[in-house]
Every structure is written in C-alpha cells, then in structure tokens.
Image (cartoon, rainbow, N blue to C red):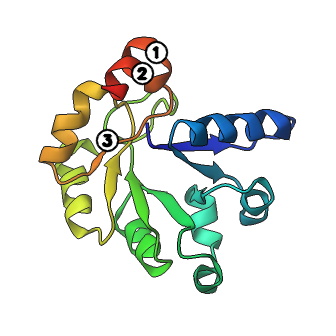
Amino acid sequence: VPLVQLRLRPGRPQLLLREAIKRVRSAGGKVLLNGSLEQARALGTDGIHLNRARLAEWDAASRPTLPPSFLVSTVVHNADELAAAERIQADIVLISPVKPTASHPGAAVLGWSEFAALAARATMPAYALGGMSLADLHAARCHGGQGIAAISAFWRSDELDQARD
C-alpha cells in the first residue's frame, strides 16, 4: 500500500505515530496525517488529509507555502465539497461513502453512479471510500476512479496479502 493515512487522536503517543511513519517509509510508502498542518509538519509526514471540517476551514493561501512534494488529500461527499477541494488545489480526493460502511453507520450512501459523476468532474485523482474492499477495485476504476481507499478493510491479513500482489 503506497499511501497510508494516520490519524492523530488525543492521547495517542506520538512515538507510536513516528514508528508507524518509519515502517511505512521503509516499505516504500508515503504517510498523510489526518490532523492539523502544524502536527503534520512536526511529525514530518509527506502530507495532510483534510476531513470535512478541515476542508471547510483550510486556507487556500497555505498551498503555495508548502513544498511541491507535500500532498494534500481530502474527503468529499458532494459537488460543493469537490469544488472546495479544487479551490484548495488538493492532490487527491476520496469520494465517500460509496457503499454502506461500518465506520459511519446510517450515512447516506452515494452509490457507484454518483461516485462516477463526481469522479468525472474531479480535476485530481479520485478514490472510492466507504464500504470498500479489494473486490471493489475494478468497479472503482470502471466508474472513473483511480482506485479505492479504506479505513479497516486492509487490516485483515488476506486483504493485505492481496494488496501486496
């Protein structure tokens, strides 16, 4: 898995995050932090992931001050959020939720047709998020996406083994 997003939660030791960053990089991957820009810089991650709230607050003027290699990803749930991602020059968008997901029970599901419509409008690579497994990779690509993203699917060893192949 070439790109991993880590979340900085209150009480989570930074030592654990630093070790995770080290391991991902030793495997040839890059790390995005789902946290503040200041936290991402302090941890030395390769970029930042903006959740819905951070996307709404992000100052587009911050982008030119970042190194060109610093990645900015964000999650989008509709056309307005996709437009916001384009305004801030996000490098990657995660379109969510495509399918029902255990991490966000009861969330309104987009489905593949709405995913396809948003992916077609995106000016940056778009990945399907929400209820994804490796079995959805082909569908994501057929609907205009670059691939899939997942919160928990890849923690199962069989999914990890397939992802490495």
- Closer to the eye: label 1 or 3: 1
Mark 1 to mark 2 CA distance (whole Å): 6 Å
Q: Going 53% across and 69% down the picture, which residue do you hit?
A: 69
**Identity, as a three-letter code, of the amino acid under mark 1:** Arg
Q: Tell me the element at label 1.
A: loop
Query: Left of 38 or right of it: where is 141?
Result: left
First in residue order: circle 1 vs circle 3: 3
- Closer to the eye: label 1 or 2: 2
Where residue 25 sits in the image (x, y, percent)?
Answer: 59, 43
Q: Tell me the element at label 3.
A: loop
Query: Residue 160 got which mark?
Result: 2
Q: Going 19% across and 60% down the picture, which residue do you hit?
A: 117
Query: Residue 156 got which mark?
Result: 1
In the rendered structure, are the residues bearing label 1 and label 3 in contact, judged by CB atoms less than 8 Å apart?
no
**Identity, as a three-letter code, of the amino acid under mark 2:** Leu
Query: Residue 98 got which mark?
Result: 3
Number of residues whose C-alpha sits closer than 10 Å to that of mark 1, classed few (under 14), some (14–19) or many (20 or more): few
Mark 3 to mark 2 CA distance (whole Å): 21 Å
Where residue 138 sits in the image (x, y, percent)?
Answer: 17, 36
> Where, quadrant-wise, is the N terminus in this rendering?
top left
In the rendered structure, are the residues bearing label 1 and label 2 in contact, judged by CB atoms less than 8 Å apart?
yes
